[in-house]
Amino acid sequence: PEPFLSVRDLRVRFSTEDGIVKAVDGLSFDVERGKTLGIVGESGSGKSVTNLTILGLHNPKTSTVEGEIVLDGQELVTAGEKEMEKLRGNKVAMIFQDPLTALSPYYTVGRQIAEPYMKHTGASKKEARARAIEMLTKVGIPQPKTRVDDYPHQFSGGMRQRAMIAMALVCDPDLLIADEPTTALDVTVQAQILDLLKELQQEVGSAIVFITHDLGVISDMADDLLVMYSGRAVERGSVREVLRAPRHPYTWGLLSSMPRLGGDTAQALNPIPGSPPSLLNPPSGCAFHPRCAFTAEAGGDRCATDRPALADGRAAACHLTADQKQRIFIDTIQPR
Ligand code: SF4
Ligand code: MG
């Protein structure tokens, strides 16, 4: 069967004053219905751009998009703005890190939840208001019948995040894109919001693309994982496979820089040396080579000249052999 969302060899380029930025550089992945794909990577790895592109929210004047994005049989790269408008907030919805990018300060929370519902389902004002109250109840807003008439500033940060989720889910989207949706929240509220998302996903059966830099959140939320670096996917597999036995040096670095549960946070952090590459002038060969500690094992010059491909299925885009990937991980990365 066809995957629900299929992205093939996606390339997104921006023209800037300084030149062409290759924000996404040949990216492929699939997401099944009812499943969650986690995308991790540092900022500038292309994860947010990928998802804005799926939603058709990139600026067509300054960017070019090549490749395929097929959602439930519909090609989105070539779709017009009218078709995208029909999809957004309806079949595809997005939740962001900052609810104030989605919620307007000028309208009540209830009206903002009701509006996409009226637009996409043709419901009356009265029906849409009832639906808004239903959604606020679902996302756990207390006294929803009164709160529906509040403005966003009358909500706490956690409540605004819930309201944005209510707005995103009001039309039962088949695909939900969540871009760092809990990063700004404290740990308790974060856990509540993540549980809420999982519950709503079970109810609606949506596919979720969950973008984060937090591997702890990913292990809790995602079924499959895609690790991005410099606009490319460098590793892919089930969350279990990638987190237990990662095969790419960049993923090793990400894992080593992750605070241990119950450990001394400050001490456990071991960030990857160097900084993320410039997307204006990405490194040749493997884009990770200037920061990689294993280029000698992989055959030296090769890393700087040949771009490693990412195979289908469980895979890592790296010139190390399968044996090397396993041995280096077990001998030098895992025991800490
Ligand atoms: Fe490191 Fe070379 Fe593998 Fe890239 S291809 S991750 S530089 S060993
Ligand atoms: Mg981002």
Image: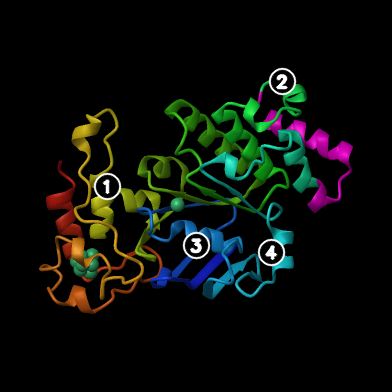
Please tell me whether mark 3 sits on a helix, a strand or a loop: helix
Please tell me whether mark 2 sits on a helix, a strand or a loop: loop
Assess whether residue 126 is covered by the magenta stretch.
yes
For the residues labelled 2 and 3, the Cα–Cα distance comes to 38 Å
Q: Which numbered circle lies on residue 50?
A: 3
Q: Residue at x 55, y 39 (%)?
A: 198
Nearer the N terminus, badge 1 or badge 3?
Answer: 3
- Quarter that holds the N terminus: bottom right
Q: Nearer the viewer, residue 244 or 46?
A: 46
For the residues labelled 2 and 4, the Cα–Cα distance comes to 35 Å
Q: Which numbered circle lies on residue 84?
A: 4
Q: Residue at x 18, y 64 (%)?
A: 323
Mark 1 or mark 3: which is in front? 3
Identity, as a three-letter code, of the amino acid under mark 1: Leu
Nearer the N terminus, badge 2 or badge 4?
Answer: 4
Name the residue beneath numbered marker 1. 255
Q: How many marks?
A: 4
**Are the residues tagged 2 and 3 within 8 Å (C-beta)?**
no
- Quarter that holds the C terminus: top left
> Is residue 174 positioned above or below 292 on the image?
above
Please tell me whether mark 4 sits on a helix, a strand or a loop: helix
For the residues labelled 1 and 2, the Cα–Cα distance comes to 42 Å
Q: Residues within 10 Å of mark 4 (few under 14, many from 20)?
A: some
Q: Residues within 10 Å of mark 1 (few under 14, many from 20)?
A: many
Name the residue beneath numbered marker 2. 143
> How far across and down, in percent of the image, does residue 311 sit?
36, 71
Identity, as a three-letter code, of the amino acid under mark 2: Gln
